[in-house]
Image: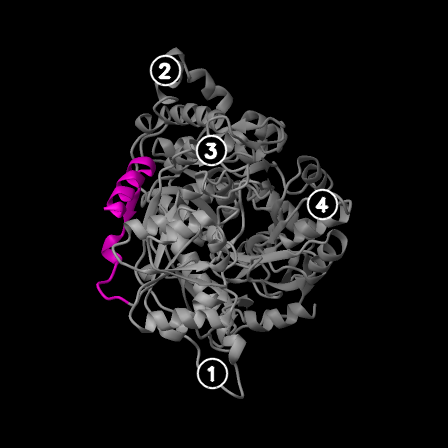
Amino acid sequence: MLAKLLRFICKILFRVEVRGLENVPKEDGLLIVANHESFLDGLLLGLFLPKKATFVVHTSVLKKWSFRQALRLTSYLAVDPTSPLAMKKVIKLLEAGENVVIFPEGRITLTGNLMKVYDGPGFVAGKTAADILPVRIDGAAESYFGRLTRHHPRRLLPKVTLTIMPTTSIAMPKATHHGFPTGKQRRRIAGEGMRSVMQKMLFQSQKSRTLFEAFLDAKDKFGDNYKLIEDINETEETYQNVLKKSLALGRIVTKVSHAGETVGVMMPNITNTVALYLGMSAFNRVPAMLNYTSGTAGMQNACIAANIKTIITSHKFIETAKLESVVAGLTNLNILYLEDLRAQFGVVDRAWLIGYALHYPRAAMEVSKPDEPAVVLFTSGSEGKPKGVVHSHKSILTNISQIMAILDFNVTDKWMLVLPVFHAFGFTASLLTIYNGMKTVIFPSPLQYKVIPEVIYDRGCTVFIATSTFLANYAKYAHPYDFYKLRVVIAGAEKLNEEVRKTYQEKFGIRILEGYGATECAPVLSANTAMANKNGSVGQFVPGLEHRLETVTGIESGGLLHVRGENVMMGYYLFDNPGVLHPPSEGWYSTGDIVELDAQGYIHIKGRVKRFAKVAGEMVSLEVVEHIANTAAPEHQHAASTQEDAGRGENIILFTTDPELKREDLQIVAKNTGSPEIAIARKIVRVEEIPVLGTGKTDYVTLKQMAETA
């Protein structure tokens, strides 16, 4: 009767919702694990799980009279989670067929995210081969029974959700006397397995929603007046400000497009740009984030591939970025400027916004589904034409959940976002911060090497993400104290230079975490973290991402990486078949990278098989390089390859049979054809003839060897 009464009270006070009851097996002997959000967690699990279980509690809990009284309502076992002897008692319970509830973190979260996971629960799971039943507790941390810092939103009676996930297990590696693993290593591996279970649980229990619905959920959680984003204008915008801009801009776009249409966005890193693509999401328009540094030809081809008819941009931006000639070269496109469109937002629209939409945004938005297209990002294809990478709302939100499951970000953080929002991580990161209540300074250009360290210092930023090349340049101009508050620095898009790693460690006392991503994966595939880091690797896979390695002829170690998961793109839009979605075969995306996995699951990238160069973090098609040369000297033969460069990642080497060809000639052609300047070869090497294979194709393997010694 007492349990029924308490269950009724909790349902009334906390509106407790239990999901996934169908995942609870009939058999006993379960190891039930849950994240630890508050002092309510044990009570909630005891009342709402349809299984009687013994609760494993920390010995320190028994020191408090109130907890001793609460524990009288259930069977419990008091242990020290760091003690191997204590874990043996838990093993005996499971082997006797009892259900056991344990919190692998051993303590209530202070950050709202997963904290350190002890090895003991993983060892228990591996030793007994027990079925693990993960349970996600969500909402209890916001109550006054939680232990979050004062920066987190607190509520008297928050809604609490218990999400029961399908059972899983941890395989304990066999002990050996002469090889790996033994003793402590086996315990550690099992602990890593439990950490993986917890991370997977956190991301898989996410709600199914659209990008705009996720924004509204965040606004409801953190409050209308919570300040979250500022740009170069140094004005901090609240959730209410961003909502107002989003609805207004979204309404404007509906006047020049139809539902479901892909609309080009050519805008810089400013708050209005973020509001624009949130607003487009609200009204079921798909923003296509155009790379305005790709030149006229690059943008024109991108628009053809994605079947874009309309581009939204700004007079002020075009003038500031000196893109007048690039825009003038675009054909068969309706280019609209926000300054002009603002005049179309009339009295009726203002009345709709103030009197209705701001108060009922969920009713005002147009319905779209989580598995429908949410954004189109662009990457270059091997034939030199850009591909449109189509992501759904679900794939973007899945990757955000994956990132939050492994990296320790929280509401006390302030991000410095310099990666452009047409870049996959720039786009995803701009939403990740908004959805999780993290303040953001969004900066228009990553190339201002002197200014950015000063802004980081002035605004007290704690999180910074950039490429190795950019990080090296910032370090040249930064005062040792400029980065005093940075606690998380992540390098991606190109291999982290060892000198850059050393500089940040010695000059700033910062450990750079290296990650790995692809536009097609929304974009994060893996990352080193505070809990799991190995220098020289790009970390371990994010939870929920399958992988396989395909053997490549001529490469002895590693293989071609293929991945599959909910964060993988819906498919490509191709230049040759505009606007038609080409999904990855059976959901598998080939990254084009040769990787090696070590025993702990860390990824080591050995090289790429695609014909791309990664110059200062930018992907450059070598086909475009050759096209420029062929245009400049059509009577001669040309072929492009790359060589490593400590400062830029890679340099492009052009081999040519033309003894007179100069870089100036290539620059003129690139300008006339609208090709990006970065696609101009760094070095030109004269050769008697271009090596070819027996099939008549260019021998790029030999060229690569020649390039490394050029």
- Kindly report which numbered mark, 2 or 3, lies closer to the viewer in this rendering: 3
Residue drawn where x is 34% and y is 48% of the image: 44
- Label 2: which residue? 355
Task: Find numbered disc 3 in the image and state the secondary structure of the residue it sits on.
Answer: helix
Residue 661 rendering spot, x and y as whole percentages: 68, 56
- Label 3: which residue? 222
Real-space CA distance between mark 2 and mark 3, rounded to the nearest whole angstrom: 23 Å
Residue drawn where x is 73% and y is 49% of the image: 475
**What numbered label is drawn on residue 686?**
none
**Quick one: label 2, few (<14), some, or many (20+) residues within 10 Å?**
few
Residue 58 rendering spot, x and y as whole percentages: 47, 58
Q: Which of 45 and 235 is in front in this view?
A: 45
Q: Give the range drawn in magenta.
A: 1-28
- Label 1: which residue? 175
Question: Looking at the image, do the residues carrying marks 4 and 3 touch, with CB atoms under 8 Å apart?
Answer: no
Real-space CA distance between mark 4 and mark 1, rounded to the nearest whole angstrom: 45 Å
**What numbered label is drawn on residue 484?**
4
